[in-house]
Image (cartoon, rainbow, N blue to C red):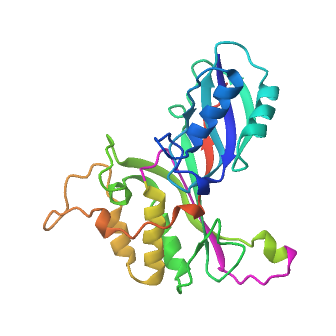
Amino acid sequence: MRYSITLCYDGSSFFGWQTQPGVPTVQGTLEDALGKLLRAPVSVTGAGRTDTAVNAIGYIAHFDAQEGLDTEALGYKLNAILPPSIVVLKLSETSAEFHSRFDATTRKYTYFLHRRKDPFAGRYSFQCTYSLDLEAMEKAASMLLGTHDFRCFQKTGTDVKTSICTVTEAGWHSYAPVHCSVMDFPAGQGDYLYFRICADRFLRNMVRAVVGSLIDVGRGKMTLEDFGALILPPDTNGRPGDGRLPSRSDAGESVPGHALFLSGITYPDPE
């Protein structure tokens, strides 16, 4: 029988989702906990990989078991033995054909950024005190929409069949953190920002490289034209002039992973 798990995790103490020898990972920690409770080896499949320190909310995974399980009791026991950095929100029986990775139709990521020194924001937000042109950053973000070849934003050496992704949402938003309202801590317009992007798939390191490049646009280090040149058409065969295609080195530096959240995964309607 197949079961789905919905969970949240703080990635700061993990070397990403995927099991790796000798280091703590979310997948490995979850498999160990399930193995202890079910008294048998358990293989857990996740909706996708997240890198070191990256967080997730509403992450979906699945595993198989030989017999029917009391999902409510198992979920309670899992939360009792898992570290505080991992929380199981829901555990339920699902279709034997369900696949948490291959059945996902979209994934959403959110990156948090604050522009002033703040003792409470730093754990899950990237401090960027540079003067930023937010209008230019928003214009650049809009260029990401649609189906494009995003090879310039993927980690060098990544082995994938295609670097084409379809982006359906990309934009910057202001927000006021909870501690500002609770403590009457003044928050100026644009002091706290998040970037949200949704696509059918993502390349390794793609979101962090995109955010780093957008910050370069905001700082004036990269023009809108330069940013647009990094977003290649899906049928890329060459470029006018010298024919050189831009590469990862032409995009901005990747921003730190601690401020990045996998914040949503959608699946086809079961009906």
Residue furthest to the left: 242
User: Residue drawn 13% across and 67% down?
Assistant: 242
265 vs 223, nearest the viewer: 265
Left or right: 233 in relation to 65: left
Numbered label tally: 0
Left or right: 180 in relation to 163: right
Q: Is residue 129 above or below residue 92?
A: below
x%, y% of residue 148? 37, 53
Position of the C terminus, as image quadrant, is top right
42 vs 72, nearest the viewer: 42
Residue 143 visible somewhere in the drawing:
no
x%, y% of residue 69? 75, 19
Position of the N terminus, as image quadrant, is top right
Residue 135 visible somewhere in the drawing:
yes
Q: Is residue 264 above or below residue 99?
A: below
181 vs 256, nearest the viewer: 256
Q: Is residue 68 above or below residue 194?
A: above
Residue furthest to the top: 67
Residue 236 shown in magenta: no
User: Residue drawn 60% across and 57% down?
Assistant: 12
User: Residue drawn 65% across and 83% down?
Assistant: 117
Left or right: 137 in relation to 172: left
Left or right: 62 in relation to 82: left
x%, y% of residue 112? 61, 67
Residue furthest to the front: 22
Residue range in magenta is: 182-204
Residue 201 shown in magenta: yes
Magenta-colored segment: predominant secondary structure: loop
x%, y% of residue 139? 49, 72
